[in-house]
Amino acid sequence: DDQMKTSRKQHRIFVEGTDVPGIVSTFKQLQSTHSINETCIEAITEKMGFKTLTPIQMQAIPALLHGREVLACAPTGSGKTLAFLLPVINHVLNRLRIRKKGTNRGFLALVLSPTRELAKQTLQECNQLTRRFVGGKPAEELLNVKLLDRSQIERFTKVGKKHSKKMDILISTPNSIVYLLEHDPPLISLEGVERLVVDESDKLFEEGKEGKSFREQLGKVYASCNNPSVRRAMFSATFAHDVQQWCLLNMDNVLQITIGGKNT
Ligand code: ADP
Ligand code: MG
């Protein structure tokens, strides 16, 4: 326990909350003790060539694997994407394993990014983690990951809720998802969502001045993610008091992780 404190201090990992899970520092450890999928670990260590976890990954990954609700703040470029994608992918894969073959019930995870561009980058990283390529051809696709772009919105408008049946993970901007939710009748359902991630939450709180504010949009998404087992996480580059207050009010036993101190 003292050793854990020393390690956290060394990596400038600050935590607030009860029952804080220990940090994980190697990808091998993730595979052996947390049973993270081999294809994902191979993608990280071979394709992407990462050697060690970054501090936010060391603490956020085990916390999310334990099903904790998390508010994480770590500088730009510190590897936040992998910190939330790996636990999300792991959860979805575990759920699909116990789900009967041929029973597609729609996406189990939703990732919100403030802009289309960031959402697209998150999709690319997710695809890297879940696809194995041999000789340039996809040899294995672990999951069906979709970006809610214009063509997907069109499909939902034509087909309705059932268009999401074969999806496992959906990545979207708040605008796009709220557009489908508020359509009459609603064109999408978030009832099946078990993992919700809000990336760049501080930015999202600043923006959305025209039309619905982000806070209202987030409220709508939260209310729509009404699955009893839903777990939520927020990630941002800067510490923002309004985001923290929102999380303390709306999340369950939230674990706050800050890397390098609150730089405000
Ligand atoms: P953030 O969202 O915190 O700004 P990103 O998730 O976009 O950061 O990651 C920044 C860069 O660091 C990306 O190019 C990513 O591939 C790389 N990266 C992420 N995790 C690691 C790691 N464990 N080791 C080395 N590079 C990493
Ligand atoms: Mg990021």
Image (spheres, rainbow, N blue to C red):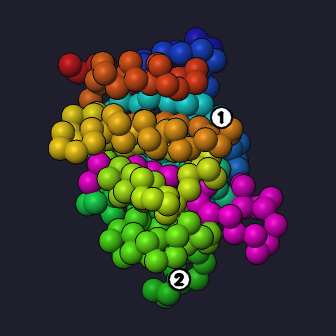
The quarter of the picture where the N terminus appears is top right
Q: Depth check: 106 or 35 in front?
A: 106
> Is residue 11 inside the magenta stretch?
no
Q: Is residue 226 above or below residue 23?
A: below
> For mark 1, what is the residue?
66
User: What residue is rendered at 32% in x and 53% in y?
Assistant: 175
Provide the residue span drawn in magenta.
94-115
Residue 134: image location, x then y, percent: 53, 84
Residue 117 placement: quadrant: bottom left
The quarter of the picture where the C terminus appears is top left
Residue at far top of view: 2
SS of the residue under disc 2: strand
User: What residue is rendered at 41% in x and 31% in y?
Assistant: 72
Q: Is residue 175 above or below residue 251?
A: below
> For mark 2, what is the residue?
138
Residue 174 seen in this snapshot: yes
- Disc with the residue nearer the chain's start (1 vs 2): 1
User: What residue is rendered at 56% in x and 52% in y?
Assistant: 190
Judge from the rendering whether residue 59 lies leftward or rightward of residue 76; answer left or right.
Answer: right
Judge from the rendering whether residue 199 lies leftward or rightward of residue 190; answer left or right.
Answer: left
Disc 1: CA contacts within 10 A as few (<14), some (14-19) or many (>=20): few
Disc 2: CA contacts within 10 A as few (<14), some (14-19) or many (>=20): few
Residue 166: image location, x then y, percent: 61, 72
Residue 6: image location, x then y, percent: 49, 16
Residue 128 seen in this snapshot: no
Say which mark, if any, is on residue 193.
none
